[in-house]
Amino acid sequence: MNLLKAGKIAQSGLLAQRVRLNVTATNLANAQVTRTLEGGPYRAKNVVLKAVPLDPANPVLQKVEVVAIKDDPSPFKEVYDPGHPDADERGIVKYPNVDVITEMVELLSASRAYEANLAVLSTTKSMYLRTLDLLK
């Protein structure tokens, strides 16, 4: 594999992990939002990633792409709080389906993957520079 392809693969990983980090941050920021512009509580989002060939002639080398950002279909959390402005006639408030612990794990996972892709880019850059030094 040439170094340019390694850089492109790592770059696609950086972009995908950045999207994961942004979506996770959005989920965490809205973990207590009971009223959105669409009506009802905030619905957690999930990032869908897909491996695609970097070069159609060589399907072994694959990069990652963000296919979609989908709503999490899991049910909302229901809490009895009759004094809440968004409580229904039974005193139940629907809270977002954001699981903070799961989101924190997702945040750590995306952060580590981002760092790993940065390390690949850094190593690729140093290999380029060393190659150029040898060619002088």
Image (cartoon, helix red, strand yellow):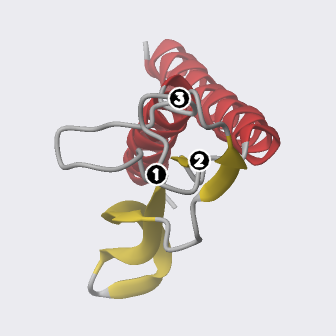
Task: In this rendered view, identify the residue nearer to me: 54 or 105.
Answer: 105
Amino acid type at mark 1 = Asp
Residue 27 position in % (x across, y down)? 51, 37
Task: In this rendered view, identify the residue nearer to me: 9 or 75.
Answer: 75
Q: Quadrant of residue 59?
A: bottom left
Residue 81 as seen in the image, left or right of residue 57: right
How far apart in space, not on screen, are marks 1 and 2 (Cα)? 5 Å
Residue 1 position in % (x across, y down)? 52, 61
Query: Mark 2 or mark 3, which is nearer the start of the sequence?
Result: 3
Which labelled disc corresponds to residue 118? none
Circle 3 residues within 10 Å: few <14, some 14–19, many ≥20: few
Q: Is residue 26 above or below residue 62?
A: above
- Residue farthest left in this picture: 37
Amino acid type at mark 2 = Gly
Q: Quadrant of residue 11?
A: top left
Q: Which residue is mark 2?
A: 91
Residue 122 as seen in the image, left or right of residue 5: right
Residue 107 position in % (x across, y down)? 68, 34
Q: Which residue is mark 3?
A: 84
Residue 17 position in % (x across, y down)? 51, 41
How far apart in space, not on screen, are marks 3 and 2 (Cα)? 8 Å
Residue at horizontal 44 percent and vertical 37 percent from the top: 34
Residue at horizontal 66 percent and vertical 37 percent from the top: 81
Task: In this rendered view, identify the residue nearer to me: 38 or 103.
Answer: 38
Q: Which residue is mark 1?
A: 88
How far apart in space, not on screen, are marks 3 and 1 (Cα)? 9 Å
Element class at badge 1: loop
Element class at badge 3: loop
Cβ atoms under marks 1 and 2 closer than 8 Å: yes
